[in-house]
Image (tube, rainbow, N blue to C red):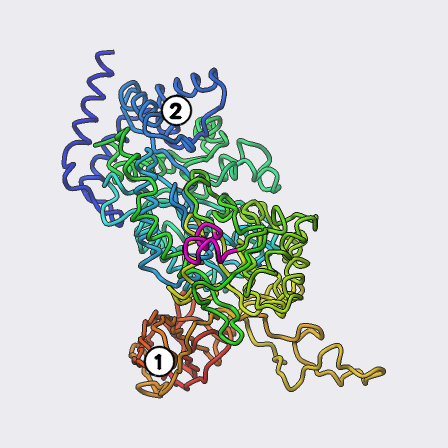
Amino acid sequence: MIKKNIVVAAVCLMALAGCNTSPSSGKAGDDVEKKVASLLSQMTLEEKIGQMVQQNPPYDAAGIDAMKEQIRQGRIGSLLNVVGAREVNELQRIAVQESRLGIPLIIGRDVIHGFRTIFPIPLGMAASWNEELVREAAAISAKEAASMGIRWTFTPMVDVSRDPRWGRIAESGGEDPLVNAMVARAMVQGLQGDDMSRPDRIAACVKHYVGYGAAEGGRDYNTTLIPDLYLHNVYLPPFKEAVKAGAATFMSAFNDINGVPASGNRQAIRDILKASYGFDGFVVSDWGSITEMIAHGFSADEKEAAFHGLNAGVDMEMASLSYSHHIKSLLDEGRVKMAWIDDAVARILRIKFRLGLFDQPYTSETLADSVLVHPNHLAVARRLAAESVVLLKNNSNLLPLKKGTPVALIGPLVNEPYEQLGTWVFDGKAENSVTVLTAMNEANGAGNTFFAEGLKYSRDKSTAGFRAAEQAIAKAQVVVAVMGEESILSGEAKCLAELKLPGKQAELLQLAASKGKPVVLVVMAGRPTGLAPLHHLADAILYAWHPGTMAGPALADLIFGDVVPSGKLPVTFPKGEGQIPIYYAHKNSGRPASAESWMHIDSIPVHAVQHSTGNTNHTLDYGFTPLYPFGYGLSYTTFAYSDIRLSASDMKQGGNVTASAIITNTGNVTATEVVQLYIRDLTGTYTRPVRELKGFERVTLAAGESKTVSFELGNDQLGYYFPDGRYVVEPGKFQVWIAPNAAEGTPQDLTLE
């Protein structure tokens, strides 16, 4: 006991030394490295392995007692899903005061888009194209989570996804690597801040590394086939940006990549992430993904799975116990190296030191009361929810409505405080949500709002409530139908073969449209839904994703014009599932589709000649264009793009050219436009996409105001990665667009010498 106390005291003194010079989340300071090395030198093999183990607490008393004993023995380094300062402190005291070396636990929790204050789902955040606001939301999420003892969260998810059938597209930044990189940077910086040791900051975990969003058929956990050219140019860039932003941790993915599971992929983790990108934090597996390599057919048993995980560079195992059970014997057999173990443990300790856990392992047990759902937090949630909404249609300028207009509110999501929160919400509460019904009553007056949901929930197939909906419509001048998906229908393992609105929602919308009154369709969903068959039924469409706690006030702000829509789609909307995958940055074929060569299936004459319908890469029914393109979004005003030019038409390697345009608000209200920069490399060693997003800027203009928006083009924008990972800038001809979305604009020509 005396020896133990001496060791603990030594470690505590070591941890306290230099405690006022905690490094930023980006680089490990010399003081931290010395502390890590000193502590590592005192650890037994069992204690080292313990740091590599993360467990989810059991539910029974006996299991909890056993877990506490393992903490005392230094056999657990991390826990997840322990919530509450008192609960966390109890376990932390065991680790700090009763284990031999007093190494604190790192407590993790999924705080995907908010803790108690829930922000829009990440796909919705991406639709705001507002990096500053996303960063602010992440900082609030960190503050609320930290007040409950949580110092590590498993977000952001920056998996590029081009398949709306995949349920986890809700958690991503959509189809484009640059937008996902923006989300990665904003979330990491917001969660961790400039000093991760601050008590209101938490460690980010960037996931899922790598390729998870390319799951075949949009089915979760499925295999991925990603050529190296696409891996380096599409799927890896957001992760590289997260490393540059100082991400503390990464999570390996469930999927296999070209036959090798991500959690056993040495090339991806050790060679690219750690060696090439210089990532110095630690990698945690996804839940059970180490032992799931057995089911993949990659590992013969749990022991081999442990070998594959550690060999690949996975430093901590989440939930499953192959590391705990087998690393010692693998070391004895010479199959794993002590250097691998020491590197993994050093990485884990490094993050614990950077978080300040050795200096202050405990959380105030009264802090949360003054932090959770603070009015300032709700104000940010309201603003971000409004900026995430995309106006897809607005015939005859139906929106905004004038306050005092008699409005019928129908649809299963009008007054569902929980469903508006979206997927991956563990700690948000329905009681904090403000629904559309509540907000519309407040904004428009209860006497002007007539509510009849028509359907009790989104999958409801009963039409028993339609009569009440008809009665509400009869009293109104305008119908607002709030439809979409319940939160359970998107997220992990929530994939769909069909994107149509579930239940009898289409029939309810048809009923509303048949009454001859203008219809505003508001869609809450975790993915692009099948709007093509419904598009003609609505006069205006607001795509709100799952907006979070303040969904109601945000939507009321938009409906009545207190806020002007500025959201832009971060993902292409298909006309039907048969178009999937459809995304803007596709390659040209040898026979590119064109309007001149395409004939719709209904227009083909009977007994038509075989090649009379054109020989290009289109489909007879849907053609070759989406329902809505990437980057699309309307406003309550219009913007004119003029004087689009390049500062030079020729450019030398290593030089720069400025692309600029004058953007003019040609309407009557102040509004924000997201101006987008695209390029195309016309010829290359490897074929390049027809367009690539290379920059964007949010510009707020008063009615009639103009502003010149400029973008710099240089090597960073004009090059691309070869399959071997080399970044190459090739001479040749380029096209450059400044446009409101990926389907519009006139290109400017640029030659790179």
Q: Nearer the viewer, residue 91 or 588?
A: 91
Mark 2 or mark 1, whichever is nearer to me: 1
Residue 723 in view here = no
Residue at the far right: name it: 607
Image-based side of 24 in relation to 736, left or right: left
Q: Residues within 10 Å of mark 2 (few under 14, many from 20)?
A: many
Q: Which residue is at a point 29% across and 20% down the rendered structure image? A: 100
The answer to which of marks 2 and 1 sits earlier in the sequence is 2
Residue interval drawn in magenta: 436-449
Image-based side of 281 in relation to 423, left or right: left
Q: Is residue 600 magenta?
A: no
- Quadrant assignment for the N terminus: top left
Check the image and report above or below for 68 versus 481: above
Image-based side of 180 in relation to 201, left or right: right
> Circle 2 sits on which residue?
75
Which element type, helix, strand or loop, lies under badge 1? strand
- Residue 40, given in percent of the width and then of the height, sits at 28, 31
Check the image and report above or below for 205 versus 617: above
Check the image and report above or below for 145 versus 555: above
Q: How far is disc 2 from disc 1 in space, using C-alphas?
A: 60 Å
- Residue 293, given in percent of the width and then of the height, sits at 56, 40
Q: Which residue is at a point 42% across and 66% down the rendered structure image? A: 565
- Residue 592, given in percent of the width and then of the height, sits at 61, 80
Check the image and report above or below for 394 versus 474: below
**Predominant secondary structure, magenta span:** helix
The three-letter amino acid code for the residue at tag 1 is Ile
Q: Nearer the viewer, residue 250 or 367?
A: 367
The three-letter amino acid code for the residue at tag 2 is Arg
Q: Is residue 444 magenta?
A: yes
> Circle 1 sits on which residue?
663
